[in-house]
Amino acid sequence: MQNMNTYLNEKNELPPRNLGVMDIFMISLIRVKELAEASVKSASKFVNYVIFISIFVALIVFGVPSASKIFSFGGFNNLFNNKMPAFSMTKEGKLQADERFEMNISNGTIIMDTDINSFVFGNFEREGLYIAIGAKNTKMIQITNIKDDSSYTEIYNYPNTMLFMEGFSNKDLTSMIPLFYVMLFIMFIIVAAYEAAKYLVIALVFAIVTRSLTNISKLPMTFTDAFRMCFYSQTISILLVNVNTAVGYIVGPIFISIIGIFITTVIIHKAMGPHMPDIDDILDKFHNDDDKQ
């Protein structure tokens, strides 16, 4: 019992250690038994770690595939002048094109259909981010649930008369290439923000479910400490799930998600393992309580 009290006193005054984001990343990957203690010591680095992970995931699922796609069609200049259908802006302020055009870049899609004046929710068949160019309007659109119109969000909506001058055609579009890179960057930030929010919510669920475990720990942990630990514990599953997505779902998304949940649960228990009280300590505590009575 005296050893347990000594241990608790030592843990109540944790020695300072300057953990960086990469330290936490490596602990989350290969030294998971240190995760619980790292979560207590790394409060000031948590936001940085969330940003790091969200950007890392956005690169895997959007940044790298987008760059690969742009390279595959020879850059935007080649795309606009050689691969897109011929189009032009009329005197009436409408865009006209020879045919419909659609190009997927990871989770984003550039779509042009001048048979439609302005894209609305019913014009899309799947979730994702869109740059949707109609005859009269150009929009950036986010759809998170194709069956729920409340998930439809217009990030921006500009009339084509504001974007394109009369006679605007394929060759003129090349002058707007910097704007398309800005649009892609905005889409990248949106993907990163979505990933951060998703994994923070999942970490909160894990923290609530495992609170009984962290409550009996010899390591003094607040709920916020447990929340950080649960976020860190997702690192391996986050990488596994998103690499699987990036390579085209070698494993089914539902099955890989189940695997990810299992891995995270195992890591949480491994992280808490070194800080769980021994059965003898628990029995000694009950014995001492009985003696006091």
Image (cartoon, rainbow, N blue to C red):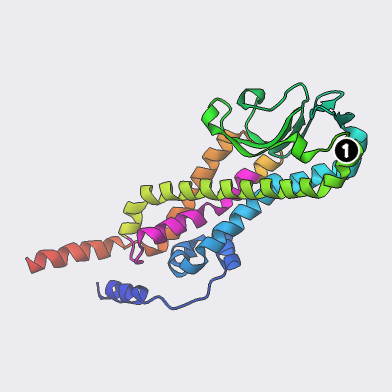
Identified at 51% across, 57% down, the residue is: 232
Q: What amino acid is labelled 1 in the image? A: Phe
Q: Is residue 31 visible?
A: no
Q: Is residue 136 visible?
A: yes
Dominant SS type (magenta): helix
Instruction: Pick the residue in front: 191 or 249.
Output: 191
Residue 230 among magenta residues: yes
In the image, taking residue 52 as reference, residue 211 lies left or right, namely left
What x and y, as percent, mark residue 68?
80, 45
Pointer 1 residue:
80
Would you identify the image quadrant in which residue 285 lies?
bottom left
* 77 over 23 or under it: above or below: above
Instruction: Pick the residue in front: 124 or 12.
Output: 124
In what quadrant of the picture does the N terminus appear? bottom left
Boundaries of the magenta span: 217-242
* 25 over 117 or under it: above or below: below
* 90 over 106 or under it: above or below: above
Identified at 87% across, 31% down, the residue is: 88
Instruction: Pick the residue in front: 200 or 264.
Output: 200
Residue 202 among magenta residues: no
What x and y, as percent, mark residue 274?
41, 63
What x and y, as percent, mark residue 74?
89, 43
Identified at 49% across, 50% down, the residue is: 200
In the image, taking residue 26 as reference, residue 182 lies left or right, namely right
What x and y, as percent, mark residue 182?
74, 50
Would you identify the image quadrant in which residue 158 lies?
top right
In the image, taking residue 94 as reference, residue 31 lies left or right, namely left
* Crowding at mark 1 (Cα within 10 Å: few <14, some 14-19, many 20+): some
Instruction: Pick the residue in front: 194 or 180.
Output: 180
Count of picture labels: 1
